[in-house]
Image (cartoon, grey):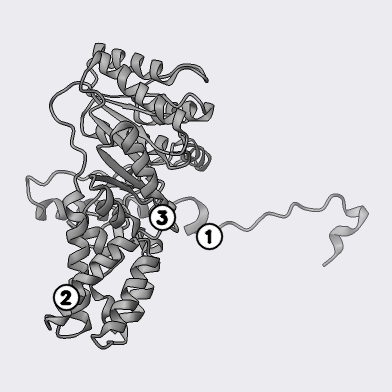
Amino acid sequence: MFKWFRKDKGAPPAIEAPPPPAAMAEPSSALPEAATGVDAAIAAAADSLAPAHRPAVEPAPMPAPTPVVGTVLSAIAAPAAETERVPALFAGEEALAPEPPKPRSLRERLAASARALTASVGNLFRRNPKLDEDLLEELETALIQADVGVTASSELVEQLRVRMKKREFADANALLAALRAQLTGLVAPHARPLRIPPTPRPFVILTVGVNGAGKTTTIGKLAMRYRQAGLAVMLAAGDTFRAAAVEQLKTWGERNQVQVIAQGSGADSASVIYDALQAASARGVDVLIADTAGRLHTQGHLMQELAKVKRVLAKIDPSAPHETLLVIDGGTGQNALNQARQFHQAVGLTGIAVTKLDGTAKGGMVFALCREMKLPIRFIGVGEKREDLREFVAADFVDALLPRELGQA
């Protein structure tokens, strides 16, 4: 069988490949034709069953892919929204914005001032004492220690003593209610906020007081109050003895967007306020608030300068100043009475503003001022914010210092 490998037999015969099967020799066209005929039959049957008006539906185009880098960069470059809305929990429900914090109540503001009175009186009535002379003596001591004053405290207790002897009180709580009513009656006639009348214009407010009482700060808060009421306000930097006072008043003017008339440090205070009144009259200003240099009530020559300011203002407007407001630090205690007497004698006060009652001031000095001076209490200061200069309301003030529920266990 291997004979063809022999050299003498010549070249080996060619080996032919076996022929391919008939089915695989060349592509058959019968299968595609049969498949095409079946597809055509199915399409024809579907067209016969579909409604005539049915439109042909074309496949929706595929969305173009979004570049990841561009999305990230655009998100970084986009400014943050000013206010982020909280999504509603249910459909149709509006997302509620957070409520602004409520201002603190007067009782909260006067908590420190009221501590001297509420602690002593509260301990006295919480044990439900007997209605006797010992109770009245302890009550009088507590009132004096709270800066109500010796004279005012004695009068209040004496009125309670007369009523107790008439058996008008069923128990100690009834006596406490009577004390609250007497304190309210003592200050209520003098709780008269400062109202700006339609005339004259400008309405001139002259502020006076000792150093550190808070005159300049009170002026700034008053300017904000009247500015919000729609009045045109001007300030006069009459405290020329203290350079910081002029800058402080200018700062308040910028905050409240009001004009400030000022001169250099050491200028004549009466001259500054005179120029301010002339400017206010020319510019149609509604309210002119004038600052003055702080001085002790015992410095006679400085007190005379305040009288000079009033005389100079009277040259332009005989009725000016229309309000002479004494600013008193509530922490000065019974010394506030001496200040009020001296300033009233020098310039004739028409109102009082008691400041810094949110601190260690005992608060009882307000009752002493009302009893001794019989002047209107215009405002009380209970904090550092502009809105913390509040109008004096007698019932609220007494309730803050001597709460109704004080005697309850």
Element carrying mark 2? helix
Which mark, by number, is residue 160? none
Q: Which residue is mark 2?
A: 162
Characterize the local packing of mark 2: few (<14), some (14-19) or many (20 or more) Cα atoms within 10 angstroms: few
Q: Is residue 171 visible?
A: yes
Instruction: Residue 157: give x, y in percent of width and height.
Output: 25, 71
Residue kind at label 3, given as amino acid type: Gly
Mark 2 vs 1: CB contact within 8 A = no
Left or right position of 194 against 267: left
Closer mark to the observer between disc 1 and disc 3: 3
Q: Is residue 385 visible?
A: no
Q: Which residue is mark 3?
A: 333
In the picture, the quarter occupied by the C terminus is bottom left
Q: Residue at x 38, y 54 (%)?
A: 357
Q: Which residue is mark 1?
A: 21
Estimate the spatial distance between the alpha carbons at disc 2 and disc 3, rounded to whole Å. Answer: 29 Å
The residue closer to the viewer here, 274 or 264, is 274
Residue kind at label 2, given as amino acid type: Val
The residue closer to the viewer here, 205 or 20, is 205
Left or right position of 229 against 382: left
Instruction: Residue 215: give x, y in percent of width and height.
Output: 40, 37
Instruction: Residue 375: give x, y in percent of width and height.
Output: 24, 45
